[in-house]
Image (cartoon, helix red, strand yellow):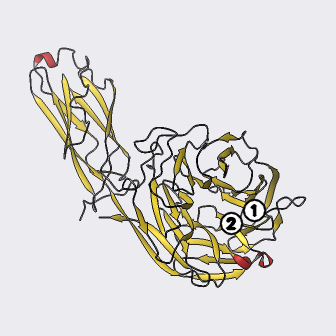
Amino acid sequence: MGPDRKHETTGWNRRIGAVAVAAIAAAASIVALPAIASARGLPPTVTTTWTKPVFMPPQSGVATLHATVKNAKSCALSAKPPIPSLPSSVACSSSSGTYHLSVAIEGLSNGTPKPFVYTITLTAKSAGGATASVKVQLVVEAYAWSVSSRSAGSAAALDAIACSTPTTCVAVGKNGTEVTYTASTVKSKVVDGGYTISTVACAPGATTLCVLGDTRGAFIPDVAGNFGASIALNSSSPVAIASVACEAPSAGYARCLVVDLNGIAAVVELHQGSPTNVVGPYSAGTSGPAYATCEGPGLCEVADQSGYGSTTDTTSFTPLVHLVAGGPALSSFACGAALCIATDASGGATPLETDLTHCLPFGALPACARVAPNAMSLRHISCGDWLCVAISSSGAEQFSFSDPAGFRWGAWNGPVKSTTLTSAGALDAVGCVSTSFSSLPGCSFLAGPAGKQKEMTGHVTLLK
C-alpha cells in the first residue's frame, strides 16, 4: 500500500530513467541579518513549505523544492534511494544571511508496480561547521494499463472509432452504421442514408460533439446523439473524406476539421442547441490519403502519406512542409499535448513539434530520428493529451507518452514493448481521449471480422 496521497497530476510509466536536477536560486532578503552573521558562528536554519509528500507523475514530471536557508555558507542535496546526476551541492550563501532556494527535480520514472518513494535531504552548513537539514518525501506514482472487451454491437464492419470521454465513444463503418458506447450501453443505428462512413472524430468533453465522414465526400454532424443532415464538402468534385479531427471545446463550441482525398478542407462548428456552421471549403494542399489531428483550441494539423503537412488555426493553412522525407509512406499521424507522431507501415515513428516546423529528439535518439521499434505495421495512432497509442496488424498496441507539463517526450514503452490485445488478428481502429491533464486517459479499440468485432476499452489506472 503506498503512502496517503492527494492526487495532483498524472503521467505514464514503465522504466526507471535518468534524472536532471536544476538549481534555480534567487537571493532575496526577508529578514536583514548582518553580513557577518555566519562568521560569528550563528547556526544555520532550513525551512520549507514542502511538509507533506509531493506526488509527481511516473514519467518525466517536475517537482520543485522551495526552501529558506539562513546563516549558511554551503548547502548539499542528497536522496535515498540515490538519484543519478543529483548535484552534491547547491548555492545558498547570501551576504544578507537569508537565501531563498528553489531546486527543480525532474526526469524521474517509475518502473515498479507501486508508488516509488524518494527521501530528499537538504543540508546547510555554516562557516563555523554547524549544520541543519530538512527532509522531504517525493513520491513517483505508478500506473497500469487495463483492458476490457465486449461485442462491438454491429453486423456490419466498423472501421473507425473516436471518444469524447474515456467511457463514451462512437464507432462508424459500412452501410452507414454508427455505434455509441458508454460504460454500460451499446447502441447501434444507421445514419447517412446507408453510405459507408469511413472516419469519425469527437471533441473531448461530457457532451458528445462529433463529425462523421463518408466515402462519397460528405460529413454528418452528431450533437449529443442528434445527427444532422449530411453536408457535401466539395460538391463540384466530390471524393471520399480522408480524415476528420476535433478541437477541445471552448465556451461550449467545438470546431472540427474535415479533409478529403484532394486536400480540400472545411471547419465544422458544433454547439448543442445551435445550428451547425461550416467555414470553407479551402485548400489544405495535401494530396491523397491525409490525416487530420487537433489539440487546440486554435491549432490543428494535417499530413498526407507522402510526409507533407501543414498547420491551421481553422481559418487558413500554413504552407506545406516536408515533415518526413525518404522513409516509407505514412500510415497515420496524430498530435498529443507535447508533440506530433507520424507512423508508417514499416513500424516506424517520427516525432515532430506541434507547429510542424521541426522534428524532435525521441527518447535517447537525436532529432529527426525515425524510430523503428519492431517489424509491426503501425496502422493507426491516436493521442489523448499525454498518452499516444499506436495499433498494429498483429493485434498488438504500443505506447508513447509525454509528461503532463508538456515539456518532454518519453521513449516508446519498455523502451519498446507491445501488448497483444486480441488473438483475432489485426486491430482495426483506436481512439484515445483525455478530458484534462488531471484526468486519466483512455482508449477504445476495434478488432475482429465483421459481425464478430470486439470493442475493447483500455484505461490507465492508478496503482497504490
Residue underneath mark 1 = 241
| Residue 312 image position (x, y, % from top left) | 70, 45
Please, is residue 78 above or below residue 225 in the view?
above
Q: Where's residue 383, x and y in %?
A: 54, 57
Q: Amino acid at mark 1?
A: Ile
Secondary structure of the residue carrying numbered label 1: strand
Residue to which mark 2 is pinned: 199
| Quadrant showing the C terminus | bottom left
Q: Position of residue 386 (x, y in %)?
A: 48, 53
| Label 1, residues with CA under 10 Å away: few <14, some 14-19, many ≥20 | many
Contact flag, marks 1 and 2 (Cβ < 8 Å): yes
Q: CA distance from mark 1 to mark 2?
A: 8 Å
Frontmost residue, 393 versus 382: 393
- Residue at far right of view: 236
Relative to 122, is 210 on the left or the right? right
Residue drawn at the location 20% of the way across and 28% of the way down: 75
The amino acid type of the residue labelled 2 equals: Thr
Q: Quadrant of residue 44?
A: top left
Residue found 62% across the figure and 56% down from its top:
248
Q: Judging from the image, what secondary structure is the residue with disc 2 in?
A: strand
Residue 68 percent across, percent down from the top left:
26, 32
